[in-house]
Amino acid sequence: MRFAMTFGQLNPKYWVEAALEADRLGFESAWLPEHLVLPVQMQGQLVPGQEHPPIPPNTPVFDAPAYLAYLAARTEQIRLGTFVYLLGIRHPFVGARAFATLDVLSGGRAEVGVGAGWLVTEWDAVGLDPSTRGRRLDEAIDVCKRLWTEDVVEHHGEFFDFAPVMFEPKPVQRPHPPIVVGGESERALRRAAERGDGWIGMSHTPQSAAVQVARLRQLEDDYGRADRPVTVTVMGQVTAPADVEQWEEAGVDRLIVVPWRRSSEAIDGLRRFAERFIEH
């Protein structure tokens, strides 16, 4: 079991200190949420059938690959990912360049967490039809993979169209940094099985995670990649060694934990968690 932390439930003033300590303690990865912009009027569903509660539109939002590149310069081993990056809301040149840069600067520690996005009014704000966001993401993933792996790329698709281009430098990781698809919907699971190297879900119990994992494995069979299973990442709680066994039995490879209740307690919480579940 790999253990990870997220900045999403932590005051930004503690982010750097928490990343440095997580790196020292042996946490495998750290994950940064992102939005391009936060509309005052919010609408959308993160979990199918459940309207997402609005978040304060004045919440601080950073350019995720840029911030992670800064953390890459301050850390040594911890992997750095997005939870999740709205790849489809940007031109794939932008996303591909950002993550290639992060991967090079980090020495091959980038995790490309992507999703279609729940906040439909964010898409409205940038002048894009939110009903197309899933198809745009699929196409953007395909384009990024080609930019990261091919010498010359020409593309004529539904949303992106360009004559032959070259893209350097390539990422350090081969064939490219892991693409970890986020989302709880059937379409997100299908996208992970079809195009992803991993799937990243929201808060789960071992029982609820097992349901999603089972569906992922079925979809992998559909796409003929049962020999290349996607990695599974979810958020969840661990309070005893038996909990770790349950997560493993559910098929979870990486667990994002939040071992604190207040941001001021985060560093001590990371230390206590590592002493119980990582160091030994």
Image (tube, rainbow, N blue to C red):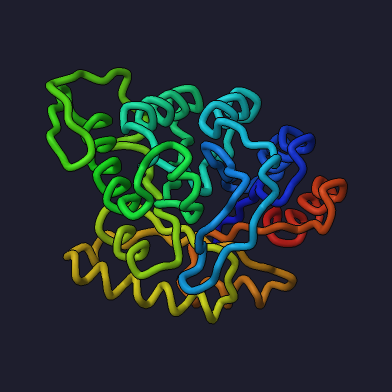
- From the image, which quarter does the N terminus lie in? bottom right
At which x and y percent is residue 237?
68, 68
Q: Is residue 84 above or below residue 207?
A: above
The residue under the point 66% across, 39% down is 23
Query: Which sits in the foreground, 127 or 265?
Result: 127
Asked whether, in this view, residue 60 is left or right of residue 195, the answer is right
The quadrant the C terminus occupies is: bottom right
Among the 4 quarters of the image, the one containing residue 108:
top left
Residue 147 higher or lower than 211, as above or below: above
Q: Position of residue 264 (x, y in %)?
A: 87, 46
Residue located 35% across and 59% down the image: 230
Q: Residue at x 66, y 52 (%)?
A: 55
In this picture, residue 277 sits left or right of residue 64:
right
As drawn, 265 above or below 97: below
- Tally of numbered discs: 0
* Vertical order, 266 against 205 (above or below): above
Q: Is residue 90 left or right of residue 205?
A: left
